[in-house]
Amino acid sequence: MSCLATAAVLVLLGVASFGWAGLAGDSYPVLPSDAAATRILPPVTDAPTGAHAFMITTADGRPVTYDPCRPIHYVVNPTGMPRDGIELVRSAIREISAATGLAFVEEGITSEPLTKVRTPRQPQRYGDRWAPVLIGWVDATIFSSVSGDIAGVGGSTAVAPEGPGSERYVSGQVALSQDWFTAAVARPGGEANARAVVMHELGHLVGLAHVHDPSEVMAESNSGLTKLGPGDRQGLAAVGSGRCHTDT
């Protein structure tokens, strides 16, 4: 989702559903070496309340989440990156990490292109593990949903190795509009708006869906918000409080 300039400029934000990974049981990677027995960061327990929604829920109503007992690894493809794009991503990730209690690990730069269909496991490129989250900048020739006022899309792939009830996210993508971000960071104060757009797409990545409340960053459009709202924080705390897994 997106924010534009500090003026009353409306930016539309997108969500990408990367769905479920239809992998055979023997296609799941081994448990990563940095998977811990308990969560890495403390849970967020003091979040305010407000409008929020989840991308996917389990049969018992729980949001599907990333595993809080292992870090979310991510890589950045710098092709088409705006000025200070890496720090823009880092700053947004710090906000989402603090609001979720999920740990993130930056692995650096990648040449992997963003695509609409991405394999969540790429052993030749990343080894025997789930591929790290891929973040980068695209144009409408790659993602037709990122055009005009659509500033970005984001989402994750989920698997359920042990059947219903074991669902969890394992990887994902955040695709940001080259044109929109290049223009945004060139405006006075535009960096804050651009960061809010990245935070919105990272919200989708970790499991939040759109809401109809315009005072929340997770609203479908943004006319100038630069900080997380109460519903954003409640939802992010919830998706940061998932279960730990020891199967893959």
Image (tube, rainbow, N blue to C red):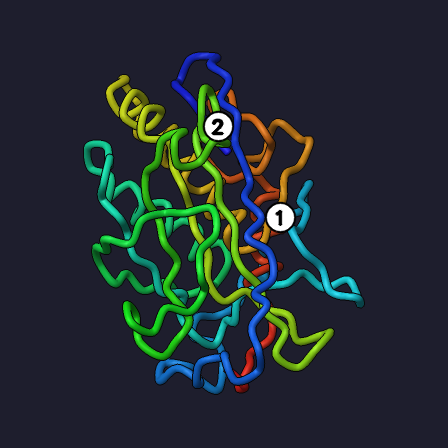
Q: Crowding near pointer 1: few (<14 within 10 Å), some, many (20+)? A: few
The residue shown at (63%, 39%) is 210
Q: Which residue is mark 2?
A: 225
Camera-side residue of 205 and 134: 134
Q: Earlier in the sequence, mark 2 or mark 1?
A: 1
How far across and down, in percent of the image, does residue 131 sit? 38, 66
The residue shown at (40%, 18%) is 6
Q: The residue under label 1 is which amino acid type?
A: Pro
Q: Which residue is mark 1?
A: 48
- Drawn side of residue 189 relative to residue 238, left or right: left
Residue 121: give its label: none
Tag 2, which secondary structure?
A: loop
How far across and down, in percent of the image, does residue 83 sit? 19, 32
The residue shown at (55%, 62%) is 240
* Above or below for 212 versus 170: above
* Above or below for 123 versus 21: below
For residue 237, which quarter of the picture? bottom right
Dot 2 and dot 1 residues touching (CB under 8 Å): no
Tag 1, which secondary structure?
A: loop
Q: The residue under label 2 is which amino acid type?
A: Leu
- Drawn side of residue 210 relative to residue 42, left or right: right
For residue 124, which quarter of the picture? bottom left
- Drawn side of residue 130 relative to residue 76, left or right: right
How far across and down, in percent of the image, does residue 215 sit? 60, 29
Q: Residue furthest top?
A: 8
Q: CA distance from mark 2 to mark 1?
A: 17 Å
How far across and down, in percent of the image, does residue 85 sit? 24, 39
Q: How many marks?
A: 2
